Amino acid sequence: MDRQKITQQRWYDSKTPLEEDGIINISTRTHIQRLKDLFPVQKAKLSLNCGCGRGGQEDIFGPSIGIDISFENIRSLIQRGGQGIVADMEFLPFRDQTFDIVYGFGILHHLSDIKKGVSEAARVLKKGGYIGFGGENNGLCPFVYIMSFVYRNWKIEKGSYRIREGNLRKIFLESGIRDFRISKRGMTIYGLGKTIYQVTSLMERILSRIKPLKMFSGYCYMAGETYQLKKGPHDR
């Protein structure tokens, strides 16, 4: 595991869990719904939740297995009744064509190599399976970089600059993903209390009506479908 991931792992293992208040729950529901809006299917036999955290976004497409590099996150997920293992998205410990859906929230910008992570996700997807990621910090949004310092988590968020539409389209296409769709939405800040939430939520409603500003929205949501079989290290 490289130095950046060790830093991330230690940060999450020592992080005090956020209280699940009303605003945090709104954030969770918002990111989930925006991602699901991009999916042509809403249920699957088995899905993989990448960067599952401590739970709250698991099983949104039906039964799932979660992966996370944080031992504490996986321990918490299992205590909640979920299924998960400690693993790195760039080195998934699953056979080719295992899952019907692979998804995650706020995970891609943490990866050392986004292309490798997406390629691994495509490898473990069944042919015709779906892949999607939501709540990714949009690299074109200036608030992303400001909030990283406000939240004091710049050391684990500094990959946000790589989340750009052109870059992601190329990566997903090269990984065997077709019908790639991406949506840039939202400017609401959820984790700094009720007043900040209300003010930024109002700003979001106003600014979302100005089409040229949408490219600077705070979050990216994307989805696509696998269309070709790939041989991996488990199929020899």
Image (cartoon, rainbow, N blue to C red):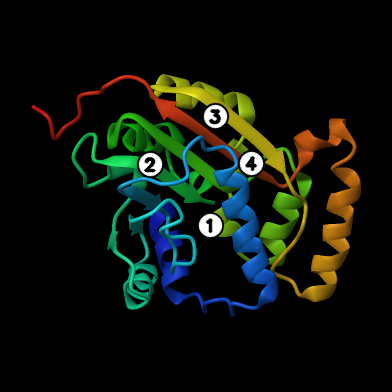
Q: Residue at x 84, y 51 (%)?
A: 204
Looking at the image, is mark 1 or mark 2 nearer the viewer? 2
Quarter occupied by residue 129: top left
Looking at the image, is mark 2 or mark 4 nearer the viewer? 2
- Position of residue 177 measured from the top left corner of the image (x, y, whole percent): 43, 24
Q: Is residue 195 above or below residue 1?
A: below
Crowd around label 4: few <14 · some 14–19 · many ≥20 (10 Å): many
- Whether label 2 touches label 4, CB < 8 Å: no
**Helix or strand or loop: what does disc 3 sit on?**
helix
Crowd around label 3: few <14 · some 14–19 · many ≥20 (10 Å): some
The residue beneath circle 3 is 168
Q: Is residue 47 left or right of residue 17?
A: left
Identify which residue, 215 or 11, lies in the foreground.
215
Extreme residue toward the left, this view:
236
- Whether label 2 touches label 3, CB < 8 Å: no
**Helix or strand or loop: what does disc 4 sit on?**
strand
- Whether label 4 touches label 3, CB < 8 Å: yes
Q: CA distance from mark 2 to mark 3?
A: 18 Å
The residue beneath circle 2 is 101
Q: Is residue 157 left or right of residue 49?
A: right
Looking at the image, is mark 1 or mark 4 nearer the viewer? 4
Amino acid carrying label 4: it is Cys
- Position of residue 236 measured from the top left corner of the image (x, y, whole percent): 8, 27
The residue beneath circle 4 is 220
